[in-house]
Each structure stands twice: as C-alpha cells, then as structure tokens.
C-alpha cells in the first residue's frame, strides 16, 4: 500500500510542473500588458517602464519563468493588480469558501446519486426505474447555470423560501444566533448553490451506479450469496453495492473538474465569495498574477482530487494497489 | 445468425430516433430562422420593453423591446454552428493525436499522453476563460479554443483502440507489404475506429453547446449585438425578478438541444458497439 501511495504521489509532481509551465507560457505569450490597467494613452511612458521594471516584466522570458516558478512553489504568488493585496491573501479567503461549497455538493452527489442509482437498479424495468432514468437524463443535459437561475426564480424570488445570495445572513442577525441557529443559517444559504452545482454530476453518478449495480447483480458471487439464503438486504449492501461502488469512486474523482468549472458559474450567480468569482473578476481586470495563481490552484485541486480517488480506490480494492507491481 | 444492419439497430432505439427527429427540427429552425422569426432579432422597440409573453411577442421581449422568440431562433444558428465546427476541430485533433500515440508508442506516446494528463487537469471552463480573456473575445477565438481544449478524451479513446488494432493481422500484413505509415493509419486503421469516434463526437456536441452557453453567459463568448442562447440568458439574469421569460426560454432551447444530441449519441453507441448486444 505504501509503495502504491508513493508511486501515485510521485506521479503528481511532473503533472504539477507541466501545469504551471503551461499557465506561465499561455499568459506571457498572450498580447496585452498587465500594467496597461494603470495607464491611459497620455501617461508618462517612463513611469510605465519603471512599473514594468518593478514587476520584472522587462526581463527575458526564461528568466521570468525561472523566478516565477521558484517563487510559486514557495507559495509566493505575487501581487494582485486588481485587489491591491498579495494574491495569497485573496486566495486564502476565497479557497475555503469554494471548498465548502464543492464538498457539500460532492456529498449530495455521492449520497443521493448512489441511492438513486441503487433504487433504479433494484427495481429494474419497473415504472420507477423508467421515471428515474428519464429524470436523470434530463438533469444530465441541463445547463447548470440556467438551472441555478431557475432555482433562484422559483425558490428565492417567487416563493421566498431561500436567500438569493451570500454565505450567511447579515452580521447583526448572524451574531445574535445560537450555534445551532448559525449552522441552520449557513445550510439555508448553501442549499440552492450546492444543489445547482451538483445537479449534473448527481445525474451522472446515478446513471453509473445503476449500470454498475445491474452488472454486479448478475454476477456469480451475488447469485451465490442469494443461494446461501442470505437476506436480500445483506446481499445488496454487503456484496453487490461494495463492488458496484468501485467505478463510482473513480467517477467522482473525474468529476472534480466539472465541480470547479461549475463553481465559477454558480458562485457568480449566487454571489458566493469563492475562487470562481475571484477568477471571473480577475479576468475582467486582466489581473495576471491572480489568474495564474488561481488557475494553477484549480488545476492542483483536480490533481489532488484524482489522487484521493486513486488512493480511495486502492483502499477498497486490493487488486488495484498490487496491480503495478509485477509490471514494473 | 446475421447481425441486423446498423440502420436497423439504430431504429430499434426509439429514444435515439426521437433525438434524431428533434435534431432535424432544430437544424430546420436554425436554417429557416429569418423566415420564422416574427421580428428582426436586433430590432429595438423601447416602448415595448419587458413585454410579457403574449399575442404580439410569443415569448416576450427584453429590456430594449427585442423579441425573445426571434433572438432564440437566431441564437440557434450561432450555438449550433459553434458546437458543430468546434467539435469537428476537436475530434480531428483527438483522432490524429490518438492515432499517433497509439501507433508509434514509445516517446511519442509518452509525450502526447502526458500532455493529455496536463490538459485534463484543468477545469475546462477555467482554461477557456483564462485564454479567451487574455486575447480579445471573438466568435473565431471561441470556436478555436473550444476545439483546442476538447480533444483529450477522444485522443485517449482512439489511442486505446489503435493500441489493439496495430497488432492485428491486417495491419501487420499492410506493414509487411511495405505500405507507407500514413496509408496504414488512414486507410487501414482509421475506418476501424470510426464508430467510437462518431459516438464521442455526437456526445461532445451537446457538451460544447453547454460550454459555449456558459462562456456567453459570463460575457466572454459571443459578443453583442449578436445573440447566442447563453448571452440572451445573461441579458435575462439582471431582469430575473420582473421578466422571467428572458432567461427561461433560451435555457429551454439549450436543454432541448443537448437532450437531442445526447439521445442520438446514446442511440448510436448502442447501435455501433457490438459489446452491448442484449
């Protein structure tokens, strides 16, 4: 298991290196100058030159790259032109909010998706199965940002059941709440964004779980378990589901990029102060250091997510963690 | 027993046929948009701003009194053609890169597949946002970038297929006969990997239309005054409290389109993949 972990971790290093290199060159080969944000056409070109010098933009590209990557891996992400603060500070505030939103969405996706898929598979060919298949197909094809707007329209503007933006109630209300009340307040605010964010992936997980369950249910060891006279509940949960979940775990790992992409849209719609919003505003302000750092962070989250999925897979399936050993 | 023909197997999947019919309707509507639209899509009529759906405007109007039905119809041209061209680009790239990696193996394979790993680590929307924002947003840039960021999945599928095909007798025979590598790749291998490629292409079109809509929704895709579905939804976002129809109808159009493409994709997969025989 240790060897498997190390192999996986080492594999991630060149990946991160490739990601940062790509970001650097894309940003630096693009036309346009980040200092142009500060200057109009009639400002003094000498000041502009001085500023370029201060930001190190007048050095040769390979040198800039060397300096940048060295600082980058030490966690010095530079100065945000748009926020007038260190990039690291901006991200430190935004990232936990995105992680909160996406982990709540991930839990919803996994729990509800697996439950729906199980139900559909167990009641194979029933009307319920058909309805579930149809509904998940709809969700799967739904534009997430549009669904978010529709949720807002219905549950926030029309019915008034949920707040339309922000992570919690205003300060003076929030401060007066009991700890339990605060939790409820938070959940109240996160419900719509998390549902909107998770919808598409939920549908995919449900579809996969159903297909995977149907395959497993037909297998010999499930027939054996039934033949032994085990109660159906034990057969389904202990024997079938455990094996059916294996591909679903990988699928969840693969869905992290979708969650982060989705977060860009959902955070913009719900005014959620996370990374997605930072990226979108950074792009409109041509805030290069912020774009570079946040794009890198988003990609690293994907790498980390896939790594976690691999490790989880290795834990539940011994075949995987030993597989590479004979090959190499 | 003879396997039923492809057409027959596709027809057996009723949903796939339904999707294909829906697709035809869509292309028909896009083609006839100038005839079907009751108003020019850009025509402003400030007196009729925010008109609710009714007799004069079937799907209502936006802030400037532009007719939503006309804008959705014209938007279909933009969204459908962007989806089609971008996927044609990404599928060709993916097929060529996947074939090269699978056929030559060795360092070619290593470099190409590591590139795939790196590109797949980026959430695609964020990569697109970053690149599009650095250049000036335009419809051409949008199409090219959607193509350039979408080939990795296809490349992986194609590589896998080619890896097993290259050891098959007919390929070995072609090589023994001294055929050139391009000829082996395009005449002998390519026809045998078309099935999964076509399925991937169909399913990708739905996804690409969704992405284009997301980018236009954020204001970084199709630029005004042209309207794609995403940008009409963006117009409707600020008016959500008092003019629900602006954002709702283009979204339904996207949903319908993506459903059709996904239905056809699933139908094709069932019809083309012999492993799924039931």
Image: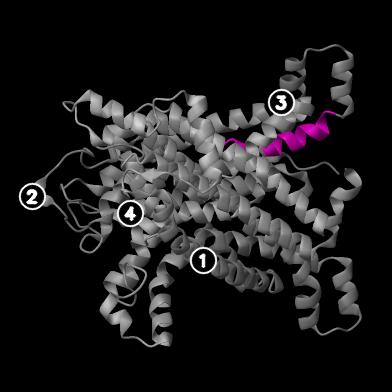
Query: What stretch of residues is rendered in magenta?
Result: B148-166
User: Is B157 in the magenta?
Assistant: yes
Q: Dot 2 falls on which chain? A: B
Q: What residue is at 57 percent from the left and 44 percent from the top? A: B203
In the image, A233 versus B122, the foreground residue is: B122
- For mark 3, what is the residue? B100
- For mark 1, what is the residue? A105
Q: Dot 3 falls on which chain? A: B
Secondary structure mostly taken by the magenta-highlighted segment of the chain: helix
* SS class, disc 3: helix
Is there one chain holding both mark 4 and mark 2?
yes
Is there one chain holding both mark 2 and mark 3?
yes
- For mark 4, what is the residue? B249
- From the image, which quarter does the N terminus of chain B lie in? top right
| Label 2 Cα crowd, 10 Å radius (few <14 / some 14-19 / many 20+) | few
| Label 1 Cα crowd, 10 Å radius (few <14 / some 14-19 / many 20+) | many
- For mark 2, what is the residue? B47
Q: Quadrant of residue A246?
A: bottom right
Q: Are marks 4 and 1 in contact (CB under 8 Å)?
A: no
């Amino acid at each position: 298991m240790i060897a498997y972990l190390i192999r996986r971790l080492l594999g991630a290093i060149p990946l991160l290196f490739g990601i940062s290199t790509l970001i650097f060159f894309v940003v630096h080969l693009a036309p346009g100058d980040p200092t142009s944000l500060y200057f109009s056409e009639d400002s003094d070109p000498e000041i502009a030159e001085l500023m370029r010098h201060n930001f190190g933009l007048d050095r040769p590209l390979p040198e800039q790259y060397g300096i940048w990557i060295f600082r980058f891996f030490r966690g010095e992400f530079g100065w945000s032109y748009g926020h007038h603060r260190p990039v690291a500070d901006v991200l430190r505030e935004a990232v936990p909010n995105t992680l909160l939103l996406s982990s709540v969405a991930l839990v919803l996706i996994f729990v509800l998706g697996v439950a729906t898929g199980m139900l559909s598979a167990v009641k194979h060919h029933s009307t319920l199965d058909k309805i579930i298949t149809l509904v998940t197909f709809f969700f799967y094809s739904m534009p997430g940002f549009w669904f978010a707007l529709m949720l807002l329209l219905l549950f926030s503007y029309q019915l008034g059941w949920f707040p339309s933006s922000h992570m919690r109630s205003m300060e003076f209300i929030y401060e007066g709440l009991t700890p339990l009340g605060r939790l409820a307040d938070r959940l109240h605010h996160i419900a719509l964004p998390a549902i909107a964010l998770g919808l598409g992936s939920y549908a995919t997980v449900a579809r996969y779980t159903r297909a995977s369950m149907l395959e497993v249910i037909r297998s010999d060891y499930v027939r054996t378990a039934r033949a032994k006279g085990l109660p159906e509940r034990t057969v389904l949960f202990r024997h079938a589901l455990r094996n059916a979940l294996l591909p679903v775990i990988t699928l969840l790992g693969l869905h992290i990029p979708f969650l982060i992409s989705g977060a860009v849209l959902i955070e913009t719609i719900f005014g959620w102060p996370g990374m997605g919003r930072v990226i979108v505003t950074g792009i409109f302000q041509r805030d290069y250091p912020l774009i570079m750092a946040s794009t890198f962070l988003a990609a690293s989250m994907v790498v980390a997510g896939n790594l976690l999925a691999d490790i989880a897979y290795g834990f539940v399936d011994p075949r995987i963690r030993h597989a590479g050993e004979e090959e190499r | 027993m003879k396997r039923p023909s492809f057409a027959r197997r596709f027809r057996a999947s009723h949903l796939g046929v339904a999707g294909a019919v829906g697709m035809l309707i869509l292309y028909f509507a896009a083609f006839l948009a100038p005839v079907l639209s009751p108003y020019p899509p850009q025509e402003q009529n400030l007196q009729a701003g925010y008109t609710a759906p009714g007799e004069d405007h079937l799907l209502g109007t936006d802030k400037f009194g532009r007719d939503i039905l006309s804008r959705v119809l014209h938007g279909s041209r933009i969204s459908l053609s962007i989806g089609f061209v971008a996927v044609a680009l990404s599928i060709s790239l993916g097929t060529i890169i996947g074939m090269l990696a699978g056929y030559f193996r060795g360092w070619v394979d290593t470099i190409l597949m590591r590139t795939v790993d790196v590109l797949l680590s980026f959430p695609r929307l964020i990569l697109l946002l970053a690149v599009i924002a650095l250049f000036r947003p335009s419809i051409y840039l949008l199409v090219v970038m959607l193509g350039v960021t979408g080939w990795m999945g296809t490349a992986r599928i194609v590589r896998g297929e080619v890896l097993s095909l290259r050891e098959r007798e007919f390929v070995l025979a072609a090589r023994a006969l001294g055929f050139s590598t391009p000829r082996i790749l395009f005449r002998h291998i390519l026809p045998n990997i078309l099935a999964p490629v076509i399925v991937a292409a169909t399913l990708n079109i739905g996804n690409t239309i969704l992405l284009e809509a997301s980018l236009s929704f954020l204001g970084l895709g199709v630029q005004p005054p042209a309207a794609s579905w995403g940008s009409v939804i963006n117009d409707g976002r600020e008016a959500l409290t008092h003019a629900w129809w602006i954002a709702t109808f283009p979204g339904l159009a996207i949903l319908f389109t993506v459903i059709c493409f996904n239905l056809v994709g699933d139908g094709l997969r069932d019809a083309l993949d012999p492993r799924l025989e039931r």
